[in-house]
Image: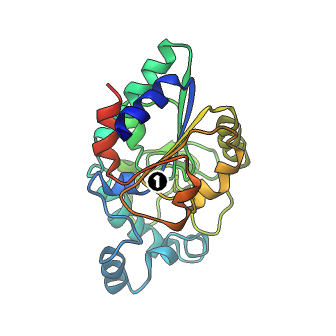
Amino acid sequence: MAYETLKQMIEESRRIMVFSGMGMIRESGISYFRDEPYAYQIEAEYGVSPEEFLSTAFYTSRPGPFYKFYKQEVLKRRNDAVPNPAHFALARLERQKEQEGGRVTVATRSISSLHGKAGSKNVIEVCGNMFRNTCTNCGKEFSPEYIMESRGIPHCDECQGAIRPGILLAGEMLDNGIVTQVANETEAADMLLVIGTHLDAYMTKRFRQYYLGDRLVLINNETHPTDREANMVIYEKVSDVLPKVIS
């Protein structure tokens, strides 16, 4: 019954906004930095927590250790992250809605570009991604391969400027352009689909206030006290649900 209701809601919606949470990463078989025991393994090996490593303070004050961690624990795992069936289902839905004159937009905190790899085009990567690393001096972009092959701290091959990782670090503010884009897309949506996270998570809590409709659907395999604020909740894995309701 829930599947049929969700399918009908999707079909009747013209503009769908999707908040894609870290549960989508886990369903692709990738551990999040705050997950146990991965977080403990990192702290035991490096003597620093993942949160401290991936902070602007650590990057600024200790770039050498930062890039050692960034290479070994972030970039080295870039090919391990592959889209799951839910990512592909959303890409199909985007194409379907475009043909009908509608729109599907995905906002995600993932830095692995999984939605893009699956074929989605309207993706807002709130925290950036690991594939676009930029020279702080001239703005030239560098691939993860360039960073991995560099010795120590990577520098631009043209101006020798420092290369900035393409991800949002702890302690940094979200780009104003991204904030405006997510807010505008959410306000324009007639359906808000929150997947792999809960309504009190950082991105959802910050942006769902802009949603004005009555089709707020939550799909997550964990419960949270804020679940009651959604119009519909399905407690299952997103990768099991979406492929069944999006043909």
Instruction: List the residue tagged with mark 1.
Output: 21
Res 68 → quadrant: bottom left
**Near-viewer residue (81 or 233):** 233
Residue 199 position in % (x across, y down): 56, 57
**Near-viewer residue (238 or 82):** 238
Q: Residue at x 44, y 27 (%)?
A: 8
Res 223 → quadrant: bottom left
In the picture, the quarter occupied by the C terminus is top left
Q: Residue at x 63, y 58 (%)?
A: 205
Relative placement, left or right, of 35 versus 191 is: left
Q: Residue at x 39, y 70 (%)?
A: 69
In the picture, the quarter occupied by the N terminus is top left
**Can residue 100 be seen in the rendering of this structure?**
yes
Disc 1 crowd rating (10 Å Cα; few below 14, some 14-19, many 20+) is many
Q: Secondary structure at mark 1?
A: loop
Relative placement, left or right, of 109 versus 234 is: right
Task: Examine the rendered structure and indicate whether residue 39 appears above or below residue 127.
Answer: below
Indicate the colouring scheme: rainbow
Task: Examine the rendered structure and indicate whether residue 224 appears above or below residue 217.
Answer: below
**Can residue 83 be seen in the rendering of this structure?**
no
Type of amino acid at the residue the image marks with label 1? Gly
**Near-viewer residue (63 or 87):** 87
Residue 200 position in % (x across, y down): 58, 62
